[in-house]
Every structure is written in C-alpha cells, then in structure tokens.
Image (cartoon, rainbow, N blue to C red):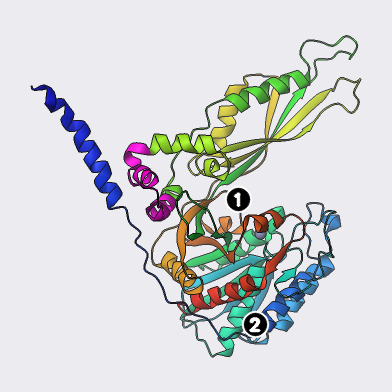
Amino acid sequence: MEWYSLLIIPIVLILLVVIRTINFNPTGIPEMRKRHEIDEKRVVDSLSKMLQFKTVSNLDSSLVNQKEFKAFRTFLKEHYPLINEQAKYSEHEAGVLFHIKGESSENPTVFMSHYDVVPVMDGWQEDPFSGRINNETVYGRGALDTKSSLNAVMESVEFALSNGKKFRNDLYLAFSGDEEIFGPSAPAIVRYFKEHDIKPYMVLDEGGAIVSNMFPGVKKKVAVIGIAEKGFLNLKLTAVSQGGHASTPPKNTPITDLSKAVIKLNNHPSFKLKLTPPVKALFDTIAPYSKSFGIKMLFANLWLFTPIVKLIAKLSGGEFLSMFKTTQAFTLASGSDAINVLPSSASFGINYRLRPGESSEAIVKKITKIINNPNIQVDVIVACEASTTSLIDDAYKMVEKAITRTWIDVIPSPYLMVATSDSRHYHEICEHVYKFSPMDVSKKDLGKIHGFDEDISIENIINGTNFYLNLIDQL
Ligand SMILES: [Zn+2]
C-alpha cells in the first residue's frame, strides 16, 4: 500500500462535508401576505375588556376570586353572539369548551388558550387590571400570557362566522382556567374528548412565538412552533437529625448531609446532552439560513459534528443548553428556625425539566445513586414526563402557512419547548399538537411575562387575529 492511500479517507470526508454544506439550503417557499378586513378597534377593545377581569390563579384556592372567573365566562357568552348561537357550550372544571359543528366530525381542530393569569407583585407602574389602551399598546396582566391568544381565537372565529364561514371539520375552542397552577381543567377537557371518542386532528396552543437573534448568522426572525415540550419533576430531599446541640454540634447534621448531596448533584456529569428529534428539526430548518459558512458546515453535518455542537451548547448555557439536557434547579431550602438551633430535619426541593427520552423514574434512580446517603429521603412531589413529538406533516404545514401569510420574512421552524403548557395533556389523543403564540416578542416582552408592566403591542393584537383567520381559511 502506498503512503498516499492513507489520505483517501480524510479527503473523502472533507469533500462530503463541503458538498453537504453547499447543498444545505433553505426549502421554504415565500407566501403572499393576507390581511383580513377585521374591525381592529373592536379586536383591541375586546382584549382590553378581558384584561380587566382579575382571573388570578393561586395554588391556595382561598385566594382565588371565583366571581371574577365566572364573570369572565359570562363575558365570553355575551360578547360573541355568533359563536354562542352556533356552538355548543360546556364547562369542565374552570375550563370552557365551545364546539362548532363542521361538515364532518372526523378530523376536528382544537384552538386552545387559558384565561387565568399569575398573581401581580408590587412594582407595577399602573393598575395591572386597567386594560388601558394607548396609541401603541394594551396594558395589563395577561396581555402576553395569554388573554391575547384567547382574544385572537374568539375574534377571528366570530369574524369568520360573520362572513358565513362553513367549517369542513368540527372546531373546538378550549380554554382552561387554571393553567398557571397546573390545574384540572385541561385534563378534564381531554377526558371529555376521550369519553366521546373525539380524536383531534390538530391542536394549537400557546408556546413559541416570533423571536429575533434565534440562531448565529441568521438575521431573519424565526417563528418557533413547539412540536414537543419538556417534562418536569419536583423532588423533595429530606435529611433528619441524629440529635445534638448547637453548642456541641455533631460532625454531620441534616444541613451538612444535604450540602454534600447538593454539591454531588451539581457537579455530576450524568445529565447527558442529547440531540432529540425536535431540536434536530429546529437546526435542520434554520441553520441553512445562516450567513456563516462555519455554522452551516457544523449543522449540515451533524452526523459528524454533533459532539462539537454539544460542546458549544455547554459553553453557551441558557436556553440553548436546556434544549439538549434535563436541567436541575435547587429550590425551596428549609431547616432550622433560629440561628442557634440545630434543625431536627432539613429539606430542599429540586426542579428537573426532563428532556424527551429521559423519564422521571430514571432520574430518581440516578440521583439516589449519586447521593448515596441512606439518611436522605427522596420524595417525588409531582412528575410529568416529556411529551411525545408531534408530526411535521400537512397539519404542521397549515400552521406554517398561516404564519407566512401573516408576517413577511419570518422563518417558521419546529422546536422543543422548554417551558410547559396545557397542551401537553393532548399528546396522548393527537399526533399534531403545536405550540405557537401568534406574536412577535422582544427580549423585553419576554421579561414581562409573569413580571411587571405586562403589555402587548396593538400590531401584535391585530396580527394575532389575522394569523388565526389565515389558519381558519384552511379549515
Ligand atoms: Zn400561559
């Protein structure tokens, strides 16, 4: 064998990488923008009215004002005459369901949202429930999360019906009233579907949005559509005292035991990074738009460069890293009540966000082994597995088309949602569960969700309604 024959493999490899990079091009077809003749003032006013109801969820049910929730439901029944005339209305826990009959009941669509909001804390500059409208925005708790999407659903369907729209398939509007506290209304609606053998063809709920600076080298905005979401697992770790006094403390106390456990867990490399299908789908869709040859080369050749991409994820941290792995956050520590008293027991919480493919059971086993201390008890407080991954097919394309008809020059892309939504309950009865909030959000907007001075731009309100109308056109 000649010496230069050794070069064949690297040369072929390099050629393959370069050819794949050159052929790694966007596949999207630009869509013509379509605007609908909606009464924009009415749409904005409706959202303002919705924001004035104090539908604040709280885990402590004595703090929940049921009257406000009931008043909101009454508002939905009075403010939308055509929907209420044509739809069958039912309530499921705090959730509401409108069923509009189409020509067929075979392939129903479900538009989801929720009308509860998280509590307000001190620091708002104005009344969080004013619903104040100015030239550019509507102000109030729930403007972004997510009375805006609920308003867009109701306004678009009411408008479509006023134009004589006949739906080919049944349409359900399903709004929960306790999403923010992981409440029972979305599961109750799913149970209703199961009991009545209703299998939605497509479900659309809040989730991704239109975001800027999503990916290195991509200047265009990206509309990220969740096709799966991470699970979560809340654990409580408790250590009990072997006795002793603070003046003559033993070497090991509940606090030292727990501290050792935290350090072991925090430093353990066992939460492996994995490139799961929804994340791969995101990279395959947006990386071809990157102006950077290096980035395109990496992502066009994930068969070879996945380890490098994982390394970049580790170095960059944040949401990019959390798409690859189960994350672990230490929370809710408690122990002694006084500085001079040893605690009889101490505990802390850990919140895991499970990546697809990693079960809560596997995590509990793994961490029990890592902690390796029989004095520490591990209790599962709540567990919800990562969702399955929805299909990217004709149903997905309908959402994609509604996006490109509403916003010009955005790239729709599948992705993995790292937060949770009520639509996670629908994965077991539907293969096309998509998570997209129809709004263009800045970093500042994202900070307002569950934060202070939440508001939404009028442009987003109008575009959101047009988005649903562009989707309804296809139903
Ligand atoms: Zn929400």
* Spot occupied by residue 159 in the image (x, y as percentages of width and height): 59, 85
Image quarter for ligand 1: bottom right
Quarter of the image holding residue 235? top right
Dot 2 corresponds to which residue? Answer: 40
Quarter of the image holding residue 8? top left
| Mark 2 C-beta to ligand 1 under 8 Å | no
Helix, strand or loop status at disc 2: helix
Left or right, 145 with respect to 13, comes to: right
Asked whether 282 falls inside the magenta stretch, the response is: yes
Dot 1 corresponds to which residue? Answer: 419
Asked whether 198 falls inside the magenta stretch, the response is: no
* Spot occupied by residue 119 in the image (x, y as percentages of width and height): 79, 56
* Spot occupied by residue 337 in the image (x, y as percentages of width and height): 89, 28
* Spot occupied by residue 373 in the image (x, y as percentages of width and height): 66, 19
Closer to us: 420 or 14: 14
Q: Which residue is at 48% across, 70% downward?
A: 408
| Mark 1 C-beta to ligand 1 under 8 Å | no
Q: Residues within 10 Å of mark 2 (few under 14, many from 20)?
A: some
Q: Which residues are magenta?
A: 281-305
Residue 471 — which label?
Answer: none
Quarter of the image holding residue 83? bottom right
